[in-house]
Amino acid sequence: MPIPKPGKDEKSDKFISRCMSWMHDNEPERPREQQLAICYSSLRTARGKGTAPKKEEQTPGVEVPLLTEEKKELTAAELMDMFVAEVKEAWDVYEASQKEEQMDTAYCVKCKEKVKIKNPKEVKNGVVGVCPKCGTEVHHYRKEE
């Protein structure tokens, strides 16, 4: 069966709900993220927004990749699998950078703000250092994993 298309006056959230229900019933082997991406793709295509944005519409610093000839021959499912893998990889990189950033900062009770730790030293359950503004000792404790 073909993927559902939105009705002429159907609201986006109603269509996504209907499409996700259809995906759940007809293609349960797909991951939920992939099902959602397919539904949003169907919505954008039906509304005439399924093409890559023009250069001036792009977010600064974000590059929209074009499909190469070899990728054009892939099926929609293979393209979606590639897309999901790329998004997961980007998310992992983002999470790693957030953890690094969190380990470099701590809350200074004297300055009453989050500061970058000066002279950080690893301790058993986190990082200890000095506030660069007032010189007070600051601590950043790790969550138990």
Image: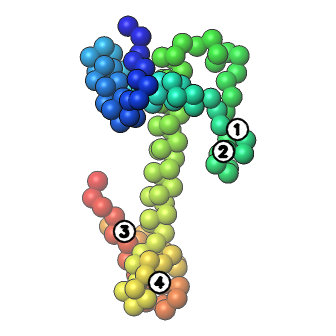
Between discs 3 and 2, the one toward the N terminus: 2
- Residue 45 picture location, percent across and down: 53, 25
Residue identifier under label 3: 126
Disc 2 to disc 1: CB gap under 8 Å:
yes
- Mark number displayed over residue 141: none
Residue identifier under label 1: 54
Say whether residue 60 is left or right of residue 38.
right
Please report the residue visible at 44 percent of the width from the left and 77 percent of the height from the top. Answer: 114
- Mark number displayed over residue 58: 2
Using a 10 Å C-alpha cutoff, classify the residue at mark 2 as few (fewer than 14 neighbours), some (14 to 19) or many (20 or more): few
Q: Is residue 118 above or below residue 12?
A: below
Name the foreground residue: 100 vs 86. 86
Q: Nearer the viewer, mark 3 or mark 2?
A: 2
- Measured in 3D between alpha carbons, the distance from the residue under mark 2 to the one under mark 4, in whole angstroms, is 41 Å
Q: Nearer the viewer, mark 4 or mark 1?
A: 1
- Residue 34 picture location, percent across and down: 41, 27
Between discs 3 and 1, the one toward the N terminus: 1
Q: Is residue 36 visible?
A: no
- The residue type indicated by label 1 comes to Lys
- Measured in 3D between alpha carbons, the distance from the residue under mark 3 to the one under mark 1, in whole angstroms, is 46 Å
Residue identifier under label 4: 130
- Residue 82 picture location, percent across and down: 53, 25
Q: Is residue 53 above or below residue 101?
A: above
